[in-house]
């Protein structure tokens, strides 16, 4: 035990010494958190330590796919593609929106301005991260595809153009993925 303790202590001192020699000219490197067993006991670094970053990545994928679906609602069955980023109830709710766009017929153009921030992390099972975003719909519009109205702007004049949006992203261990499970636009909360 003393020999292992001495080896670990030597490595720690060596790494501290090397950090001091590295100087301020080098940018710190970012490494991925992996479970690490410590020789002194059974403690490990939890994979959920990376939950905020993983949830933000899943949230970005959600927006990427959902914006594609909004631009081309009649192009294909979007369920398989959206399932890569969403789970129910958010998945079914968004598929209903895409179906509604296709039936009008209409599509979206432009993009939302966004500024997502992680506002809550829960390590309970399953792990859950809440992201609060400020959506800016100034450059995003609903456009008609109906004959005789092609290209007409269908934006509702009373709908706010900037509002808070909350998403809950959950880690699904059986799929080994983070998926957007719930979304809540808060039109009454400007940002």
Image: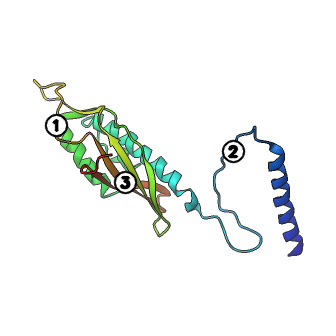
Whether the residues at callouts 1 and 3 have beta carbons within 8 Å, the answer is: no
Which one is in front in this view, the residue at disc 1 or the one at disc 3?
1
Q: Quadrant of residue 74?
A: top left
- In the image, what residue occupies the spot 88% across and 68% down? 6
Task: Tell which circle, 2 or 1, labels the residue nearer the N-terminal end.
Answer: 2
Q: Is residue 41 above or below residue 113?
A: below
Measuring from the top left, give residue 57's x and y in whole percent: 48, 47
**Residue tagged by mark 1?**
157
Residues 124 and 115: in front is: 115
- In the image, what residue occupies the spot 24% across and 43% down? 98
Q: CA distance from mark 2 to mark 3?
A: 30 Å
**Residue tagged by mark 2?**
29
Q: Is residue 78 above or below residue 71?
A: below
Q: Which mark is residue 167?
A: 3
Whether the residues at callouts 2 and 3 have beta carbons within 8 Å, the answer is: no
Residues 112 and 105: in front is: 112
Q: Is residue 189 above or below residue 4?
A: above
Whether the residues at callouts 2 and 1 have beta carbons within 8 Å, the answer is: no
Circle 3 sits in a helix, a strand or a loop, which is it? strand
């Amino acid at each position: 035990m003393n020999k292992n303790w001495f080896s670990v202590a030597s490595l720690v001192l060596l790494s501290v010494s090397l950090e001091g020699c590295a100087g301020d000219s080098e940018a710190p490197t970012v490494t991925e958190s992996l479970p690490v067993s410590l020789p002194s006991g059974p403690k490990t670094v939890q994979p959920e330590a990376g939950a905020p970053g993983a949830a933000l990545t899943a949230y970005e994928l959600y927006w990427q796919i959902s914006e594609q679906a909004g631009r081309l609602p009649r192009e294909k069955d979007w369920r398989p593609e959206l399932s890569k980023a969403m789970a129910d109830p958010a998945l079914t709710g968004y598929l209903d929106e895409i179906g509604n766009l296709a039936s009008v017929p209409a599509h979206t153009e432009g993009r939302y301005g966004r500024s997502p921030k992680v506002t809550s992390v829960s390590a309970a099972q399953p792990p859950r991260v809440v992201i609060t975003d400020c959506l800016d719909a100034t450059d995003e519009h609903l456009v008609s595809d109906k004959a005789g109205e092609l290209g007409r702007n269908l934006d509702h004049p009373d709908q706010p153009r900037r509002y808070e949006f909350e998403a809950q992203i959950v880690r699904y261990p059986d799929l080994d993925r983070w998926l957007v499970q719930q979304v809540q636009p808060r039109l009454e909360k400007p940002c």
